[in-house]
Image: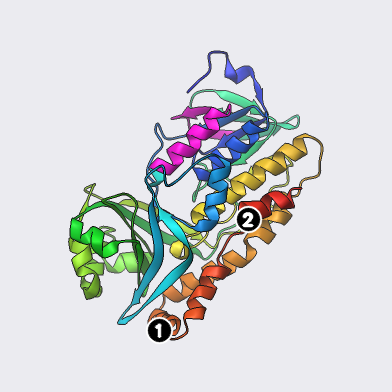
Amino acid sequence: MRTAHNESHDVWDSIVIGAGLAGSAAAYHLAQRGRRVLLLEREATIHPKVCGEVIRAEALPYLLAMDVDVAALGAQQLTRARCLAGSARTTLLFPTPAYGLSRVTLDTACSARAMAVGTTLHLGETVHAIAQTDGAYDITTSHDTYRGRSIILATGKHDLRSVQTRATRHSLRGAVGIKWHCQATHAAVAELGNTVWMLAFPGGYAGLCRVGATTVNLCGSVTPAWLARHGRQPHQLRAFLHDTFPIARPLLDGLTSEDTQPLVIAGIPYGFFRPAASLTHDGAYAVGDQVATMPSVVGIGMTVALATGTLAAIDLDATLRGQPRRYEDQLHRLLARARRAALFTHAMMTSAAAPYGVRLCRWLPPLGHGVLHASRVPSAGVVFARQG
């Protein structure tokens, strides 16, 4: 993953911190335009993440622009969502099929595409400090110090350790994400089919979908209060779902966790949206969850990551050629409506009003379809057109 010459003495066009979807997309588009890009990832391998792993249709153009074909990677097509809250239930058809795919598989493919066009990737390298001097950035890591004309922050739902990067936090910051990968029986695979199950309850929600032929993602988001009521034991979520949703018991009984404990992330700042003025230096960009942390209930997190990474790279390349920066203005136009729809849906699905909302969607199907439409992130064609 490292080149032979002494990289610490080089000046990179951009140093991207975080090799998830947003960071890999940014690195890919910069390197493709001839920029020298260093991509830093603190983990030693491309690692699992707490994520619902639903790729909405709007994400596909961004992936295809990187020559990533999710069907070839084994993604499972998803055509509808089955929503349950209390005794209420309804089914929403997706206007365009979505896909379920492991983040390890997808992130590996995206980082590989970034390297294929010239990005240098360093795994297992933690950033300790960022300093701006003489119009460039000095990045001190666990291994070395690097200098770049620009930086892209793609560190996910949490800030860099020892480096404050976020401008503010939203009141939903206490959310706790919990995720299992499970192997499913033939009966469970047949029960799930091409459906995403959404189970809502006061204080949280959970979703299930296939991300492989027999692999199922079970992922939930709960409040700290819910977790406290259940002994601060994240693994209790599965037992709670089993007790609360009898209709889902046959499905849950057919799932065997691949790990002894779930993957957990606490303090998720759902609703965070970075103010346009918070990054005052022309060479600094925030992408993915570092610029907008969307509630996971509407499944747009991966689209936001890819869209912002793509948009930042194109804008940064333009600024390096002397053009004015336009990223923040375009970003807020790109995401404002989707963010409002996601926050509304999150508030509804985690409250005692969730059964009423599900019943309304059953009685008035256009209401549910309207939520799906309102939470769309514009396609890649729109992003590229705005950069024209």
Residue 115 disc label = none
How busy is the neighbourhood of tag 1: few (under 14 within 10 Å), some, or many (20 plus)?
Answer: some
Residue at 62% in and 51% down: 380
Q: Position of residue 206 (x, y in %)?
A: 35, 65
Residue 274 disc label = 2
Dot 1 amino acid type: Arg
Task: Please give left or right for residue 215 compared with residue 388 in the image.
Answer: left
**Stretch in magenta:** 105-129
Q: Position of residue 311 (x, y in %)?
A: 65, 47
Q: Is residue 126 covered in magenta?
A: yes
Give the answer, above or below, for where 135 lies relative to 88.
above
Dot 2 amino acid type: Arg
How busy is the neighbourhood of tag 2: few (under 14 within 10 Å), some, or many (20 plus)?
Answer: many
> Which of the two marks, 2 or 1, is nearer to us in this view?
1
Is the residue under label 1 in contact with that under label 2 (CB below 8 Å)? Answer: no
Residue at 52% in and 34% down: 113
Q: Position of residue 57 (x, y in %)?
A: 51, 57
Residue at 62% in and 67% down: 337
Q: Earlier in the sequence, mark 2 or mark 1?
A: 2
Q: Position of residue 65 (x, y in %)?
A: 58, 43
Q: Give the CA separation, mark 2 to mark 1.
A: 34 Å
Q: Is residue 146 covered in magenta?
A: no
**Helix, strand or loop at mark 1:** helix
Residue at 59% in and 20% down: 8
Q: For residue 204, say whether it is visible.
A: yes
**Residue position for label 1:** 359
The quadrant where residue 185 appears = bottom left
Q: For residue 276, say whether it is visible.
A: no
